[in-house]
Image (cartoon, rainbow, N blue to C red):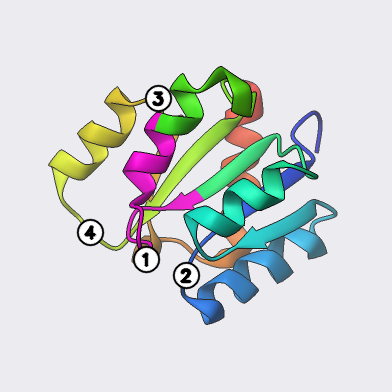
Amino acid sequence: MAGLKNVLVVEDDAMIRDLYKMALANADYTVEVADSADELYAKLDRFKPDIMFLDVMLPGTSGLEILKELRTNSELDCQDIKVVVLTNLAQRTVADNAMENGADGYIIKADILPKDLPKVIESLEED
């Protein structure tokens, strides 16, 4: 683990959120979680993530809308955060939209085990 130490997991499914948090904490990352846009923005007031795992389907505001806000609103100071979009939607348009709006990666949740998340972070550190 080199530079990306602080991780924010934004996921509304409590079971997935807890599994991701546990897997990342066990790999010695500092992990915070949020279940909505409101909680995410509140966390950003006191926690500066190096990387964010951001679910597409969230209550209220979609992850893609949040991604646009993170990339364009300089007051949030999140332009340099690595953002990996999480979804169970295996639709190419969702992936394309996420990448066009500044995502650093895209993961289909059904295709990854929580224990593999540190490998995703390591691959982003190599880029």
Q: Who's the residue at 63% across and 75% down the image?
A: 18
Dot 4 lies on which element? Answer: loop
Q: Are marks 4 and 2 in contact (CB under 8 Å)?
A: no
Camera-nearest label, 4 or 1: 1
Residue lying at 37% horizontally and 66% vertically, measured from the top left: 59
Residue at disc 2, secondary structure: loop
Residue 50 position within the rendered picture, expressed as x and y whole percent measured from the top left: 70, 34
CA gap between label 2 and label 1 equals 7 Å
Task: Write the start and end of the magenta stretch as one range.
Answer: 54-68
The quadrant holding residue 78 is top right
Going 45% across and 20% down the picture, which residue do you hit? 72
- Residue 12 numbered mark, or none: 2
Q: Are marks 2 and 1 in contact (CB under 8 Å)?
A: yes
| Mark sitting earlier along the chain (3/2) | 2
Quadrant of residue 127 in the image? top right
Q: Which residue is mark 3?
A: 102
**Hey, what amino acid is under mark 4?**
Leu
Badge 2 local density, few (<14 within 10 Å), some, or many (20+)?
some
Measure the alpha-carbon separation of dots 3 and 2: 21 Å
Q: Secondary structure at mark 1?
A: loop
Query: Dot 3: what SS?
Result: loop
What amino acid does circle 2 point to?
Asp
Above or below for 86 versus 77: below
Task: List the residue tagged with mark 1.
Answer: 59
The dot on residue 89 is 4
Q: Is residue 81 above or below residue 115?
A: above
Type of the residue with mark 3: Gly
In the image, is residue 122 above or below residue 13? Answer: above
